[in-house]
Image: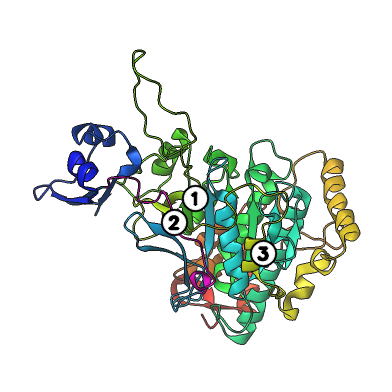
């Protein structure tokens, strides 16, 4: 099969099936050995999770070159999807920015080792958000070096961990304000065309959430809170992280469980990462991913008596990966080419041209007060530096890592306050798929990263919310949000 593909330049496709009652399993290295293939990027194996599989053998890597991304690729279709890349078989890779069938904002996670193309992948996402009128808030924790062209192209931009905390506090406050506003309107979901979608991105999030990081506890809580409450009010959360260890994402099982339900993109990774993806459920059971090498040069043994092959640089694999949340999680893909391949001394004009000269979408005025002082002063670098200093000094004075104490305010320092139990209870009911008992609500509230509460306190809050008409009492001691 390998000889046929190599000699004729043809693509060989094998349909494999095991007898009824059995499930396909395989060892990729053994399969490559049997087919006499030494280039792992030339063979793709996809299974249906049961009896059948398709093995595709290429004469050379089909993703060695891909076309450039266009604005047409980045306009959402009627399903809220954009085209970000191509699969090995030439079919488009579609990532969802918004789910119009449920009104749900999305969660995003981009994994990739250094040099894997993570920044360009994020840049495609940010351009698409601007093109589609999505409000983007971005913390580039690589001192602004990851996506420098994004400065001025998003609504709220910063480069420090203190800024990330201020931005997350503002986003949580906006989500809760929208929740209260929508509840008063009798709405239980987000509708595109009224308020804009808001996407909150943190690049190099490992720096914020890794073990020992100063702001880890509060950062984890705020991101988790956005994941829980933002979906139904049009506030999405996205993280771009080094593919090293999932423990660097706040050490939170709840956070990881939230993210695996979102749009998860895996670029070149470490060997340890693969074991974690399987164990954490981010990779469907029975699926295997072919390792992505740093270059497309196949590994060949060379005898000391043979002539040494040319040492020219082989094509890189930047942008190659897997869309784990897509319909073909084990199908290798590559993101469309964006910008200059060669390093530039300054901003990339091709990337800037895709962003366009238009001003980015802005947060609706109804949420400005909730977004707080940080959002109001976002265009004043001196004032923002002062607010970031307040966050840093506050932590230094506490002498310990703060939790969600300031999660409900976007201003930082003066005027910030602790998240109310009423908001935490409302968030639990909002995220529920079915009516909840007081015990259920207490368990969810105690899992949100805030101060632990007793059942009696939850019952009292549920009673007050019911009396105010915000919550509806059902039979058998169950509760739902009013008009939901």
Residue 104: x percent and y percent? 51, 72
Q: In the rendered image, which residue does mark 2 sit on?
A: 66
What label does residue 352 carry, if any? Answer: 3
Residue ID at (40%, 59%): 86
Identify the element where label 1 is drawn.
loop
Residue 275: x percent and y percent? 41, 37
Q: Earlier in the sequence, mark 1 or mark 2?
A: 2
Q: Is residue 483 left or right of residue 53?
A: right
Q: What span is in magenta?
A: 58-75
What label does residue 45 carry, if any? Answer: none
Q: Residues within 10 Å of mark 3 (few under 14, many from 20)?
A: some
| Furthest residue in direction top, as rendered | 305
Q: Residues within 10 Å of mark 2 (few under 14, many from 20)?
A: some
Q: Earlier in the sequence, mark 3 or mark 2?
A: 2
Q: Is residue 199 above or below residue 33?
A: below
Observer able to see residue 96: yes
Identify the element where label 2 is drawn.
loop
- In space, the residues marked 1 and 2 are separated at their CA atoms by 10 Å
Q: Main secondary structure of the magenta part?
A: loop
Residue ID at (47%, 44%): 317
Please state which of the two labelled residues, at mark 3 or mark 1, is closer to the viewer: 3
Observer able to see residue 421: no
Q: In the rendered image, which residue does mark 1 sit on?
A: 319
- In space, the residues marked 3 and 2 are separated at their CA atoms by 20 Å
């Amino acid at each position: 099969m390998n000889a046929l593909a190599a000699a004729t330049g043809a693509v060989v496709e094998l349909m494999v099936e095991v007898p009824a009652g059995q499930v396909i399993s395989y060892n990729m290295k053994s399969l490559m050995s049997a087919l006499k293939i030494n280039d792992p990027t030339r063979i793709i194996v996809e299974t249906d999770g049961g009896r059948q599989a398709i093995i595709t053998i290429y004469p050379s890597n089909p993703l060695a070159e891909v076309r450039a991304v266009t604005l047409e690729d980045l306009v959402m279709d009627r399903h809220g999807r954009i085209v970000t890349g191509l699969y090995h078989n030439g079919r488009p890779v579609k990532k969802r920015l918004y789910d119009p069938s449920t009104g749900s904002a999305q969660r995003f996670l981009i994994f990739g080792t250094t040099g894997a193309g993570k920044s360009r992948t994020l840049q495609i996402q940010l351009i698409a958000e601007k093109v589609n009128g999505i409000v983007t808030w971005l913390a580039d924790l690589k001192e602004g070096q990851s996506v420098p062209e994004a400065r001025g192209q998003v609504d709220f931009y910063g480069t420090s961990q203190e800024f990330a905390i201020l931005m997350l506090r503002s986003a949580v406050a906006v989500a809760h304000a929208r929740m209260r506003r929508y509840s008063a309107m009798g709405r239980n979901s987000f509708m595109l065309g009224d308020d804009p979608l808001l996407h909150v991105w943190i690049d190099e999030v490992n720096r914020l959430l890794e073990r020992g990081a100063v702001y880890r506890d509060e950062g984890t809580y705020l991101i988790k809170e956005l994941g829980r409450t933002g979906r139904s009010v049009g506030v999405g959360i996205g993280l771009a992280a080094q593919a090293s260890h999932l423990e660097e994402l706040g050490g939170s099982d709840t956070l990881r469980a939230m993210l695996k339900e979102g749009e998860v993109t895996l670029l070149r990774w470490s060997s340890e990462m693969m074991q974690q993806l399987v164990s954490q459920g981010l990779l469907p059971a029975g699926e295997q991913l072919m390792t992505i090498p740093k270059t497309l040069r196949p590994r060949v043994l060379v005898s000391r008596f043979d002539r040494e092959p040319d040492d020219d640089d082989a094509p890189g694999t930047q942008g190659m990966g897997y869309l784990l949340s897509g319909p073909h999680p084990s199908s290798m893909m590559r993101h469309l080419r964006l910008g200059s391949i060669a390093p530039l001394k300054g901003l990339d004009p091709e990337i800037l041209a895709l962003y366009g000269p238009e001003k980015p979408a802005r947060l609706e005025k109804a949420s400005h007060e909730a977004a707080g002082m940080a959002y109001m002063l976002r265009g004043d670098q001196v004032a923002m530096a002062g607010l970031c200093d307040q966050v840093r000094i506050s932590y230094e004075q506490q002498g310990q890592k703060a939790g969600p104490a300031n999660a409900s305010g976007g201003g930082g320092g003066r005027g910030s306050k602790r998240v109310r139990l009423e908001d935490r209870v409302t968030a639990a009911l909002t995220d529920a798929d079915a009516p909840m008992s007081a015990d259920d609500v207490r368990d969810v509230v105690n899992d949100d990263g805030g101060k632990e509460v007793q059942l009696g306190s939850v019952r009292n809050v549920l009673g007050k919310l019911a009396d105010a008409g915000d919550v509806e009492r059902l039979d058998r001691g169950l509760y739902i949000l009013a008009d939901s």
